[in-house]
Amino acid sequence: MKKLLFVFLMAISFNSFAQDIPDSMLVDGWNMVGVVGLNLSQTALVNWSQGGSNSLAFSAYTNLGAIYHSFPWKWKNKLNIIYGRTKLEDVGYRTTENDIYFESVASRNIGWAVDPFVSVTVRTSVTKGYDYSVADTNIQIVDFFDPGYISEAIGFTYDNNKIITTRLGFAFQQTFTNRFTNYTDDPETPEIETFKLDTGLESVTEVNYEFLENMKYYSFLRLFSRFSSLDVWDVRWDNIITAKVNDYINVNFNVSVVHEISQTRKTQLRESLQLGLSYAIF
């Protein structure tokens, strides 16, 4: 039989962030923004002499935003969910994306350069997640709300620039666990704690920058430091560059950096390149 190669690649992707509506475009009442996305890719090999494995990968995500505006008040809400898996012929399915992030921020314009705000954020996994770093093992390390993080902050926000918004405040962070108590347990006590409370400082900065007519850069940076160790910071930094080919096709390049020593002392990095269609549901 002659060599036969069949490679099928399909990618359907949507802009990965529900970006804020500029203040100049806000109407009184609710303002909705949001996108949903699905990425699919498949590779099938028959008698392929150069090596490789059959593979199937998918990721689905939704990014929704709701802003309630009634001057001088503004209430911004954002929900990002992403879940993805990859199946390799030799090792089966592996989870590659597994995140839920919800944020709610209420602020009041008082005529200053910065506005006072209060915020609540919730972070967790969609479902079970595993450590695949050791060959031939699937060690579960997370589950839905195990761990789960809830943070409350109060401070001041700068929200008068169409490119950059930032806020800084005093924060309380609660960590909840069930099975995976390594995220909450204090090794210096005989009990096994399933809850941990941290107080400290939280900074959140977002950038929306259109540097070419058809290209945009979006960045989300969250920093958190505990008062007990102000020289140590938790970092979550999401970046996306979107190139608009036409009204329906986008190319998205994503890079995410996470550094939290309660999870691992190593800096975590995730990168993806996506080509596909775009559609806004609001």
Image (cartoon, rainbow, N blue to C red):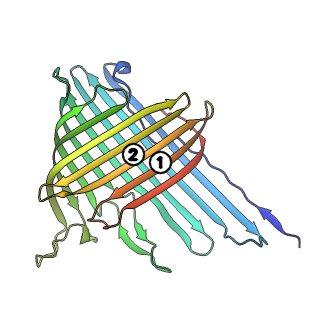
- Give the residue at mark 1: 61
- Rendering coords of residue 203 (x, y %): 24, 44
The type of residue carrying mark 1 is: Tyr
Residue drawn 15% across the image and 57% down it: 198
Q: Which mark is residue 45?
A: none
- Left or right: residue 74 compared with residue 141: left
- Left or right: residue 17 compared with residue 262: right
Q: CA distance from mark 1 to mark 2?
A: 7 Å
- Rendering coords of residue 248 (x, y %): 61, 34
| Residue 15 visible in the current orientation | no
Instruction: Find out whether the residues at labels 1 and 2 contact each other: C-beta distance under 8 Å.
Output: yes
- Give the residue at mark 2: 80
> Considering the numbered disc 2 on the image, is that residue within a helix, a strand or a loop?
strand
| Res 230 → quadrant | bottom left
- Rendering coords of residue 222 (x, y %): 29, 47
Residue drawn 42% across the image and 37% down it: 18
- Left or right: residue 127 compared with residue 189: right
Residue drawn 20% across the image and 40% down it: 168
Query: On screen, 134 above or below 84?
Result: below
| Residue 184 visible in the current orientation | yes
Name the outermost residue toward the right. Answer: 1
Relative to the observer, which residue lies in front, 217 or 25? 217
| Res 165 → quadrant | top left
Relative to the observer, which residue lies in front, 101 or 213? 213
Query: On screen, 231 above or below 220?
Result: below
Report crowding for label 2: few under 14, some 14 to 19, many 20 or more residues within 10 A (C-alpha). many
